[in-house]
Image (cartoon, helix red, strand yellow):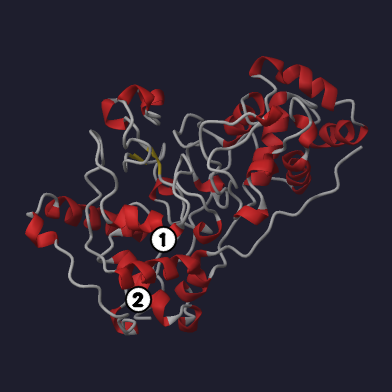
């Protein structure tokens, strides 16, 4: 590597310069975008030619009224795995974020309580505590609000007006009654303290020891030759870092309120009144029509299917859609354009994304009785 890894904050400047380059090349004549014949795999760039690899996460923002404690985290861990929170005892938070599916959803659209299909795909939640807004459309402004939303909404089916009643049922479980009295002595077990405990646990779901992270910290052998080629493309010709700035690999994680873009997913062949309007439903701003939050790319090779509607089955196809400029519609972001990548370059990008695989797992705790 050319030098020690730069701090994550420097990515704002890198992303800004990349975005400028994107806008500058927008609208070039078609003949300038023609793809060359597919080349054979190219040698990996020399270390001196590789871009610097940022390391070191920012400090996570913890709410003043929900500071982390070991007992609170342990309580939230139990609640996260406890299907008794759902209306029919069939679903827990973990049901949508299982290890076998990369910590994201198995099916294109999430399945909630009473086997009801929901409207969006369950995303990966590694490092979710670094977001400033939650859900694909950012409608929840905290992890605590997201936990209550999923509990009262379709995911667990309780209904927001019935959370107090469900909490009273759970409070009859001897173990929970004792733990809540210890962790929240002034409040006890309420819908708010249930959400606080779950959020505290979710803030511990950190993925920061991938092959990329080891490379960024100075282990040049952590990436394969093909992954180093993909890293150079990710930061350069592919322009991926504009939306997926390292080391978090979602620029939305470093932005107050998040970042939301329309890349065209879910718009093709649909009348406008049948399109999921995404962020627009929250803000009512035309610029947010069919725009969705930028997900992190950490663990992306393990978490198919992809995008907010789970409509793309393979990572190879997801990369190809994004690198070729997304799907045209009335509000597609100007940040996307056809990068003219060869098949070999697409393969190198996919190989690099494998360097973002998270090694941790969510462990099933013993539930209170």
- Does dot 1 land on a helix, a strand or a loop? helix
Q: Position of residue 99 (x, y in %)?
A: 66, 55
Q: Is residue 317 above or below residue 53?
A: above
Q: Could you tell whether 87 is left or right of 107 in the image?
A: right
Say left or right for 22 vs 154: left
Against 82, is 361 above or below? below
In the image, 9 versus 368, the foreground residue is: 368
| Residue occupying image coordinates x 53% and y 59% | 299
Residue 88 locus on image (x, y percent): 77, 27
Nearest the eye: 358 or 5: 358
Please give the name of the residue rendered at 68% of the width and 45% of the height, measured from the top-left corner: 201
Give the farthest residue toward the front: 269
Q: Which percent across, then down, holds residue 166? A: 77, 21
* Quarter of the N terminus within the rendering: bottom left
> In which image quadrant can residue 202 be found?
top right
Residue that badge 1 annotates: 316
Rendering coords of residue 143 (x, y %): 58, 37
303 left or right, relative to 34: right
Q: For mark 2, does the 10 Å Cα neighbourhood hold few (<14), some (14 to 19), or many (20 or more) residues?
A: many
Q: Quadrant of the C terminus?
A: top right
Q: Are marks 1 and 2 in contact (CB under 8 Å)?
A: no
Lower position in the chain sequence, tag 1 or tag 2: 2
Which residue is identified by label 2?
Answer: 229
Disc sitting over residue 83 in the figure: none
Hey, which quadrant is residue 216 in on the image? bottom left
On the picture, is 108 further left or further right than 277?
right
At 32% from the left and 43% from the top, the residue drawn is 263
Residue 245 seen from this side: no
């Amino acid at each position: 590597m050319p030098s020690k890894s730069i701090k994550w904050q420097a990515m704002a400047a890198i992303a800004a310069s990349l975005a400028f380059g994107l806008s500058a090349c927008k609208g070039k004549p078609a003949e300038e975008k023609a793809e060359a014949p597919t080349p054979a795999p190219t040698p990996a760039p020399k270390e001196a030619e590789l871009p610097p690899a940022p390391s070191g996460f920012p400090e996570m923002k913890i709410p003043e009224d929900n500071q982390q404690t070991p007992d609170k985290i342990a309580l939230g861990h139990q609640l996260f795995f406890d299907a008794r929170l759902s209306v029919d005892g069939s679903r827990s938070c973990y049901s949508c974020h299982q290890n076998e599916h990369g910590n994201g959803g198995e099916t294109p659209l999430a399945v909630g309580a009473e086997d009801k299909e929901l409207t969006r795909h369950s995303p990966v939640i590694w490092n979710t505590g670094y977001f400033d807004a939650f859900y694909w459309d950012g409608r929840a402004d905290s992890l605590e609000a997201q936990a209550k939303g999923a509990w009262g909404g379709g995911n667990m089916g309780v209904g927001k007006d019935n959370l107090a009643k469900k909490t009273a049922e759970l409070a009859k479980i001897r173990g929970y009654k004792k733990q809540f009295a210890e962790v929240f002595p002034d409040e006890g077990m309420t819908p708010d303290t249930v959400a606080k405990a779950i959020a505290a646990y979710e803030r511990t779901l950190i993925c920061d020891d991938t092959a990329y992270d080891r490379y960024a910290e100075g282990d040049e052998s952590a990436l394969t030759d093909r992954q180093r080629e993909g890293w150079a493309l990710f930061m350069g010709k592919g322009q991926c870092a504009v939306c997926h700035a390292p080391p978090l690999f979602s620029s939305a994680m470093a932005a107050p309120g998040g970042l939301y873009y329309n890349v065209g997913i879910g718009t093709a062949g649909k009348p406008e009144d049948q399109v999921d309007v995404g962020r627009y439903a929250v803000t009512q701003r035309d610029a947010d029509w069919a725009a969705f939050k930028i997900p992190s790319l950490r663990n992306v090779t393990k978490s198919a299917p992809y995008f907010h509607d789970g409509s793309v089955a393979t990572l190879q196809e997801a990369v190809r859609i994004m690198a070729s400029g997304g799907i045209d519609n009335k509000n597609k972001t100007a940040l996307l354009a056809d990068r003219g990548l060869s098949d070999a370059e697409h393969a190198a990008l996919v190989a690099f994304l494998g360097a973002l695989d998270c090694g941790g797992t969510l462990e099933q705790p013993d539930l209170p009785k």
